[in-house]
Amino acid sequence: MSLQLLTAAASLTGPKPRNEDAWALLLPPDGESQRGALLLLADGVSQCADGQLAARRCVEALSRDYYLVPDSWSPLQAISALARSQHLCLSRQAPEPGWLTTLTALALQGEQMHLWHVGDCRLYRWRQQQWCCLSDDHCHEQPGLSHVLKQAMGNGAPLIPQMLSEGLQVGDLLLLASDGVWAYLNDGQLSPTELEQNALQLWVKRLVSQALAQGGRDNATALAVRVVALGAELPTPTGLPLPGKLRVGDRLDGMEITGILQRGRTMQVCLARHPEYGQVVLKSLLPGLAEEARGRELLEREGWLLRRLDGRHVPLLYRPRQSACYLLMDYLEGETLAQRLEGGKLSVAQAIGLGVRLTLLLESLETQQVYHRDIKPENLLYSTDGQLFLLDFGIASMAGDELGIESLAGTPSFIAPELYQGGEFTHGCDAYAAAVSLYFALTGRYPYGEIEPFQHPHFGEPVSARRWRSEVPAWFDELLMKALAREPQQRFASAREWRMALEHGGIQRRDEPSEGPKGIHSELKSWQWIGVVSLVINLLLLVLLFF
């Protein structure tokens, strides 16, 4: 039997100019009933740069990803990973004085409720004709500071959330309320003693309206859920069995193994023919591993991150019914950048095109808060239709996710200098690895020289690409050196900034003298014509507008 609930929500702006509360009340999509229901409430901080934006981002992120996490994750593990990633994202992206918000998440699953809470929204439970407040207010206790938060999403400090799991009972009424509701109503006014089962929505609307009528000066938001029937107790996930060592001709879940692409110490990657998806790539652990649990965790996370990216510059991940533990991905025809470079270095025009494609790929990673951690020519694939894809998310992670991956995991020559000094992994580290890949594709060398495993390098200044290729335009070399700078703060602030510089650099500096042969001018001609055509169109629009 599945968990049965009645739900309701209401939110009013009140006397404030806009509503900075954000909320969501989610029931599981088809086939995901084991994950249960999720209630979210965030109250944006008015005194920050944009509390409304912070609240909406947090609620949208958890709403989007909660049902995509690995099945083996507990509700609190899933909420914690997603919330910490969003906390880090807000902390790094917001202008002063920051994007700040509270966040309270309530997951209902089987016979249990699970609370994850930061801030001063409150969770109440009505049972046996009395209210019990289950959440703590994360506010200062000194006189006059009781409204000031001690911690919030986006403030940059380590999060210390309240996490609580308790059993549910039939008839339980759970109320999530912002301080714009609970601060203006007493327990008697909250009382649902006359509440009919079919009037939950009317009761919630009355609560928020009454809070404002009592002198409320804040946004007022309340979410309520009544337990009608408990779900079955959920077993602890044990995971599917491993498929074993696969060989050509083997069959698994209706697929036929048609090739072995890679087999290492812990992992195998096979080519297969699927009756519905056609040619696919299957990735699984090899049996008999001493650290099988750790391997399963990494494989599950890889699948989750691919689902987050949803085919944007990465292979599309399929989710069929399966009898064994493996990932199933779309097979991409083409060649890796490393394979292409076996035929020689890229031309300058090809390198510029690659740079733009790399920045688009990096933007996708930044948007979804995913760290790849091993960008290099072997993991960059040109498909037959000219698109660029990023492969192998085996050591990838999400921002804020305590995965336990070594900071120096990856390929030594592509690891950012700050990581060798014990620095924290950021999106800038992936961007640095992409810049090294671009430099290598253009010159066949590494900007700081090749770095061997277990070596602890000392970084000076990157060697100009023009030293090895005199035809490289000065503007492009300048941008490449900026992307490869030793100090992170000297590089581009984001992938988008790098892309804009690449797309406009050749046009803005087209009259710069070049030391290269005339052939380079013909290769870059298309970039210059784009700028000319764009200028002519804009001038024509101005003429039509004013005359």
Image (cartoon, grey):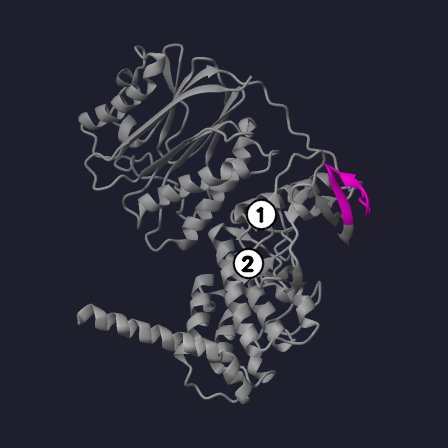
| Mark 2 residue crowding within 10 angstroms, few (<14) / some (14–19) / many (20+) | few
| Mark 1 residue crowding within 10 angstroms, few (<14) / some (14–19) / many (20+) | many
Q: Which residue is mark 1?
A: 306
Q: Which image quarter holds the C terminus?
A: bottom left
Q: Secondary structure at mark 2?
A: loop
Would you place residue 233 above or below residue 397 in this image?
above
Among numbered discs 1 and 2, the one appearing first in the sequence: 1
Would you place residue 279 above or below residue 190 in this image?
below
| Residue at (66, 43) in percent of width and height | 327
Magenta span has 89? no
Q: Position of residue 407 (x, y in %)?
A: 61, 55
Q: Which residue is mark 2?
A: 423
Q: Position of residue 443 (x, y in %)?
A: 62, 77
Residue 246, by quadrant, is top right
Would you place residue 510 above or below residue 68 in this image?
below
Q: Position of residue 493 (x, y in %)?
A: 44, 63
Q: Secondary structure at mark 1?
A: helix
Residue 322, by quadrant, is top right
In the image, taking residue 249 as reference, residue 208 lies left or right, namely left
Q: Which residues are magenta?
A: 244-258
Please tell me the numbered disc located at residue 535. none
Q: Is residue 243 visible?
A: no
Q: Which image quarter holds the N terminus?
A: top right
The residue lying toward the viewer, choosing from 539 and 247, is 539
Q: Is residue 62 visible?
A: yes
The residue lying toward the viewer, choosing from 391 and 405, is 391
| Residue at (47, 80) in percent of width and height | 525
Residue 467, by quadrant, is bottom right
